[in-house]
Image: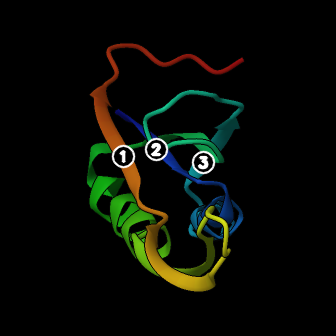
Amino acid sequence: MKLIITIIDDQDVDKVMSTLTSQRIGVTRVSSTGGLLGPGSSTLMIGVDESQVPQAMQIVGELAAQRQAVVPYGYSASLPLASLVEIPVGGFSSFVLDIDHFEQV
């Protein structure tokens, strides 16, 4: 058995959880704070058999991949110039851990 701990952007968490559960892959969302991906991230704990790790990671990879977004950019000077700038958003960090013992009551 494996435990996948995945930190993903809050914008992606609902679609990742929905897709995982539709594939009968158990997932738990844990409130989290910290700087691994910056503000606005969630931690998912995904418990799977070793054979399901590639499937779970493929779902996370497809639905939480880093992408470009256009956001307003303001220049703070005497003459403010408003423009748009393209920045990377999303992405994920995953850790796959071996589980020695699992018990569900």
Q: Residues within 10 Å of mark 2 (few under 14, many from 20)?
A: some
* Sequence-first tag of 2 and 1: 2
Q: Secondary structure at mark 1?
A: strand
* Vertical placement of residue 86 versus 13, above or below: below
- Spatial CA distance of label 3 from label 1 is 18 Å
In the orientation shown, which residue stands out farthest toward the front? 78
Amino acid type of disc 3?
Gly
* Vertical placement of residue 47 versus 59, above or below: above
Q: Residue at x 60, y 45 (%)?
A: 41
Q: Residues within 10 Å of mark 3 (few under 14, many from 20)?
A: some
Amino acid type of disc 2?
Leu
Q: Residues within 10 Å of mark 1 (few under 14, many from 20)?
A: some
User: Circle 3 sits on which residue?
Assistant: 26
Q: Secondary structure at mark 3?
A: strand
- Spatial CA distance of label 2 from label 3 is 23 Å
- Of residues 34 and 23, the one nearer the viewer is 34
User: Circle 2 sits on which residue?
Assistant: 37
- Spatial CA distance of label 2 from label 1 is 8 Å
For the N terminus, the image quarter is: top left
Give the side of residue 97 with respect to residue 3, left or right. Answer: left
User: Circle 1 sits on which residue?
Assistant: 93
Give the side of residue 99 with respect to residue 8, left or right. Answer: left
- Of residues 54 and 87, the one nearer the viewer is 87
Q: Secondary structure at mark 2?
A: loop
Amino acid type of disc 1?
Ser
* Sequence-first tag of 3 and 1: 3
For the C terminus, the image quarter is: top right
